[in-house]
Structure formats: C-alpha cells, structure tokens
Image (spheres, rainbow, N blue to C red):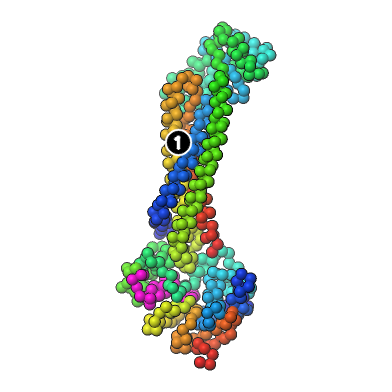
Amino acid sequence: MTRLRYFVRETLISLRRNLLMTLAGILTVAVSLFLFGGVMLLSRLVENGTDRWRHDVKLEIFMNVDASNGQIAAVEEELKGSPEVKDFEFLTKKDAYDEFKRIFPDDPALVSEVEPASLPTSFRVVPTQAEFTASIANRFTGRTGVDEVITAQEQVDRMLTATRWIRFTFWSLAAVLLASSLFLIVNTIRLATFARRREIEVMKLVGASNWFVRVPFMAEGLVQGAIGAGLAFGLVYGLRVILTDLVKNADNLFTHFYVTSSDAVGIGIIVLLIGAGIGMLGSAIGLRRFLEV
Amino acid sequence: MIRFENVSKIYKGSVTALNDVSVDIAKGEFVFLVGPSGSGKSTFLKLLLRDEMASSGRIVVAGRDIGRLGSWKVPQLRRNIGCVFQDYKLLPSKTVYENVAFALEVIGRPRHIINTQVPQILDLVGLTKKADNFTTELSGGEQQRVSIARAFVNRPLILLADEPTGNLDPGTTVGIMRLLDRINRYGTTVVMATHDQRIVDAMRRRVLELDRGQLVRDQARGVYGVGA
C-alpha cells in the first residue's frame, strides 16, 4: 500500500514536472497510432468490400431466390463445360446467410428479419483470363433462373491497387512517427531522471532495489504511451463511424464496404498494446544507464 | 564484520587507488581512516558499498564476499550500511522528517514502522523540533544530524562516514562526534574517513592510515600523525 501510493505520487509529480515533453510524447504517439489504426481500418474496409473478388473471382452469378434445382444444375453444367471458366464455386443459401451475418453483425434486427431461405444461391466464377469476364457475364444474363450477374468492375481492381499504395505510404509514415514518439519518450524519461538525480542517488545509497528506482519512470512512459494510444483509439473509432456513414450514403458499388465495430475494437486493442509497448520500451531505453548499480 | 584480503583497486588500468590492503574490522569497532587526499580513503568506502568493484582481492562484509554478489543483491548490502557524507546529500524539496522517512519508504517499509521509527531517530539526533523544517533552513551541523538520522534510521550494522565534519566548525564537530560515538555504542560498526587531527587525537580509537593506496599504519587507540 505504501509502495503503491509512493509510485502513483512519484509518477504524477514527474509527469507534471515535464508537462511539455510529456504532451509532445503523448501527441506523437496519438498521431502515429491514429495513422496506424486508420490504415488498418481502411485495410479491413477494402478487405471486407472485396472479399468476394479475391482469388481472381471476376464475376458472381446470382440465381433467383426460387430458382429450381434443375435451373441451378443447368448453370452448373454449363460452367463446367465452358473452356473460358477456370474455376467456380457454388454458394448455398446457408453460405449466403453466413456471409450476410458476417456483414451485419452490428445490426441484429436486420439479421433476425432475414432467413436463409430468402437469400439467393450464387456461383463465384474465375475465368481463365480476365478478358473473358464480359462474355461469360453476357452469356448468363437473362438465363432462366438467373437473377443477375455482377462483375468485378475495373474500379474494384483499381481500388485494390490504389489501396495497396495508400497502405504502404501510411504504414511508412506511421512507422516513422512511432519511432519519433519513441525518441520523445526516451528523452522525457532522461530529463526526468536528470531532474531527480539527487533522489536517485539517495535511493541507491540507502538500498532501494533497482526496480523500486525504475518503476515510477516506467509508469511515466507507460502512461504517456497509453494516453496517446487511447486518443488514437478514440480517433479510429470516430473514423469508423464516419466511414460507415459515407458508405451508407454512397451508391450500391460500396454497399459491400463496411467495418464492423468489432473490427474497430480489435484494431483499438492492437493500438493500445502498441502504445503501451512503445511507452515501456522508451522508458527502458531512457533508464538504461540505471540498470547498472 | 569487515574484512579486506589483499584488496587492490586500479582505476582505468593505470591509477592505483588501493594497493594490496588487508585489514579486519570487528563488529562494534570505531575506526578512523586517515591519510592525505588521494591516499585511497574514499575508494576504501566505495568498495565497501560496492559502488566500485575491487580489481583484485576479496572484501567480506557480514560474512559475505561482496565481490560475488549479484547486482540485484547490492541493495540488500546497502541496507546494512548507513552512509554519511561531507555534503550531507539531503533532498532540498523535502522536510527533515520527509528526508528521513524517504530512506525507509524506498526500501518498502510499511507506513506504521516509518511513523514510529522516524520520530525516535529524530529524538536521538536532537531534531524533533525541526522535523517540519526544510533542510535548507538548517545549519550545517543540523543538516549533518539529519543525514546521520537517515543513515541510521534503518539500524544498519555498519555506518560509513566520509569526512562528516569537513564542513563544520569545531564546536559543531564535537556534537556530531558525540552522536557517532553514541551510535557506535549501540553496537554499530563505524568507519570514518577524516582529515581532522583533533578528533582523532581526542577520541583515541583504532586508526588505519593510508598513503598512496597502501595501508601504512594500523594502530589501536591511535592518534592522527605518527609520533604525535
């Protein structure tokens, strides 16, 4: 109890004493982790939105909800016999329902209204060459039992390439900022130990254990990292709300783009862990010369 | 209590601070460490604290070879050794009481022990009335008393004093020496490095004289200078 009170008191004093440096450390952690979290969020968004277009799937043939087994079998036969088709996958009503649940975990009311039976079955098709996409789509459009054929438009393909670049740029930026926040924390801790060198000298003299000397400084770094990460988490969560709103109001191409709140929370936890880790690491480096007695 | 066996200390490969020193100090002894500046007195004390490591030889404190202590055990050693310095090393941002309590706080003593031991020790050094003063408001002699209180509050086996009266006038010095003598009578082994001839001659305790790192004299009930 005495110790805990001691650590809390000493940490707060030290944070206040170096207020400006502390704020600088917190802000850089926040900005870098916000970028980091934002990129992760964007990645999730693109990943979720382009899920069906992965593995070179270029088009999806949706059957009518009440399409007969014969009609489904006919389409399947034709896909099998078509030399332009490299591969295809049949999604049952249950598969469609599972995916639906995955897309709308935040909207249980919506999910409860939908039943597997009310969803269409579909074929996801991989053509042997991308150029065949249109011809395959044309062939199946209007076929009996087929509701519609949707294709991976060029936009989707372009988006995948573009986001790859955005991701790379943001990751690099976030890495650089994280490194600078690490330096700032190291520096803050160095200043703090310098400001308190007399106390530290006395502590060592009377036989305070090494960890006892270090804990307040470690806590100081940890607090900086964690507060920065907390801010970043808030910003990322806000970004998610904005993104979801944008997507809702956009045209139907984007209706598949979404981030669930569990995505955001998952990213938030990663962000917090990294923030705390950066804080601890910064303190450890700043305190390195105190590791020797 | 303290045993040096052929201890040498060479700084940075060239400066020899202690050269093959062997000495035995029993529990409860009061020992003066004398010699000119640079003779190795401070090194002797630093080695005892494991502030420095001996270059060769063995140092045994309370039955333990301190050269072989892991660095995590050094704090434990230091809890058994109180230290007093010429410049007091007090914390100006804390009061007298807080300075003494700090020494117990940082070794994790519970609050109720701190609350009983600090007033006791302040009474012993005669500073009960100044408990709430900041150390900057005290005279040199009073500051040294605070520093002694801090060194002794944990009841260490050994008290090291490095020129504790170096900054004090003769009148104040007498008071400090009485205090150290009293602490010694509680059974604490006291090792005091000093330049002050009058104290050594007046107290007539064991004297170890160092000269350029060599132990040149070990005399029970000695005086400061040879033949004085």
Q: Chain of mark 1?
A: A
Q: Nearer the viewer, residue B146 or B182?
A: B146
* Residue A51 in sight from this viewpoint: no
Residue A125 position (above or below residue A143): below
Q: Is residue B10 above or below residue A77?
A: below
Question: What is the quadrant of the N terminus of chain A in the image?
Answer: bottom left
Q: Residue at x 38, y 73 (%)?
A: B143
Residue B157 forms part of the magenta stretch: yes
Residue drawn at (46%, 60%) of the image: A194
The residue sitting at 46% across, 84% down in the picture is B196
* Depth order, front residue of A229/A159: A159
Residue A37 locus on image (x, y percent): 49, 37
Residue type beneath disc 1: Val
Residue stretch rendered in magenta on the structure: B135-161
Disc 1 element: helix
- Answer whether residue B206 is visible to the viewer in this image: yes
Task: Please report the residue visible at 59 percent of the width from the left and 10 percent of the height from the top.
Answer: A138
* Residue bearing the label numbered 1: A236
Residue at the left extreme, as displayed: B129
For the C terminus of chain A, the quadrant is bottom right
Report x, y in % for residue A6: 41, 58
The picture places residue B156, in percent across and down from the top left corner, at 47, 73
Determine if the magenta segment contains residue B49. Answer: no
Q: How many marks do you count on the picture?
A: 1
| Residue A153 image point, x, y percent | 56, 19
Residue A137 position (above or below residue B49): above
